[in-house]
Image: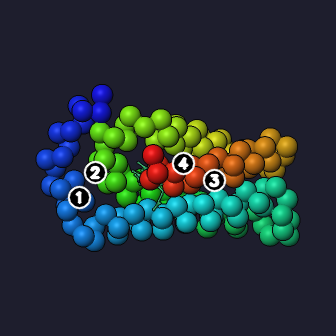
Amino acid sequence: MGESLNFLNDFWLVQAMKYSLWLYPTVESLHICGIGMLFGSVVLMDLRLLGVCPNIDFKAISRLGISVSMFGFTLAVLTGSMMFITHAADLIGSRLFVIKMCLIFLLLSNAAVLHMRSGINAITKVQAIVSLAGWSTVIGLGRWLAYV
Ligand code: HEM
């Protein structure tokens, strides 16, 4: 299956990602900036849902947190896609990469359901724990990919 993606090698962006000295490291750094924005704001919102700092208004945290996390996620998707097309044939056959993508999809669904709920209750607390554990796992899988 991986070989069918070899045609991507002729794409100018893939050539630039492979042969430019600075492009790949810059894109990877921006991927990490995006992850930092996403994870940093998710941690603040999830901890608040779990009852940390109850005197801080959750709506106020989430108003800023949702915008920052969406910006960070968009940056991670754009830069992640640029890195993906550079190694598409290898990555598409990697179980770790497929698990990472499926987990991201599940965590986005979890975030969307959380956003639709009103009020904090036992279910939102469970969703906050799932979110914290899940995004941490995505970071671990991303880092791990470099070693397999
Ligand atoms: C559609 C979205 C995404 C795609 C296509 C994607 C793709 C990639 C690719 C191709 C790599 C390079 C792997 C390698 O070294 O061979 C990578 C690295 C990484 N990704 Fe993603 N990624 C996405 C979103 C995310 C998100 C949302 C997170 C975390 C919340 C994340 C965490 C990481 C981490 C921690 C690394 C390692 C960075 C490093 O070691 O420099 N990725 N990603």
Residue 48 x/y as whole percent: 78, 61
3 or 132: nearer the viewer: 3
Circle 2 — which element? helix
| Vertical side of 71 occupied by 100: above or below | above
Badge 4 residue CB within 8 Å of ligand 1: yes
26 or 111: nearer the viewer: 26
Residue 72 x/y as whole percent: 50, 62
Q: Which residue is mark 1?
A: 18
Give how far apart the Cα atoms at labels 3 and 1 are.
29 Å
Most distant residue in the top direction:
1
Circle 1 — which element? helix
The tag earlier along the polypeptide, 4 or 2, is: 2
Dot 1 amino acid type? Lys
Badge 2 residue CB within 8 Å of ligand 1: yes
Give how far apart the Cα atoms at labels 4 and 3 are.
9 Å
For the residues labelled 4 and 3, say whether their Cβ atoms are less than 8 Å apart: no
| Vertical side of 68 occupied by 138: above or below | above
Left/right of residue 43 with respect to residue 18 in the rendered view: right
**The disc label shown at residue 141, or none:** 4
The tag earlier along the polypeptide, 3 or 2, is: 2
Residue at image position (70%, 64%) is 44
For the residues labelled 1 and 2, say whether their Cβ atoms are less than 8 Å apart: yes
Dot 2 amino acid type? Thr
Give how far apart the Cα atoms at labels 3 and 2 are.
25 Å
Residue at image position (82%, 55%) is 50
Q: Nearer the viewer, mark 3 or mark 1?
A: 1
Q: How is the image coloured?
A: rainbow
Dot 3 amino acid type? Ser
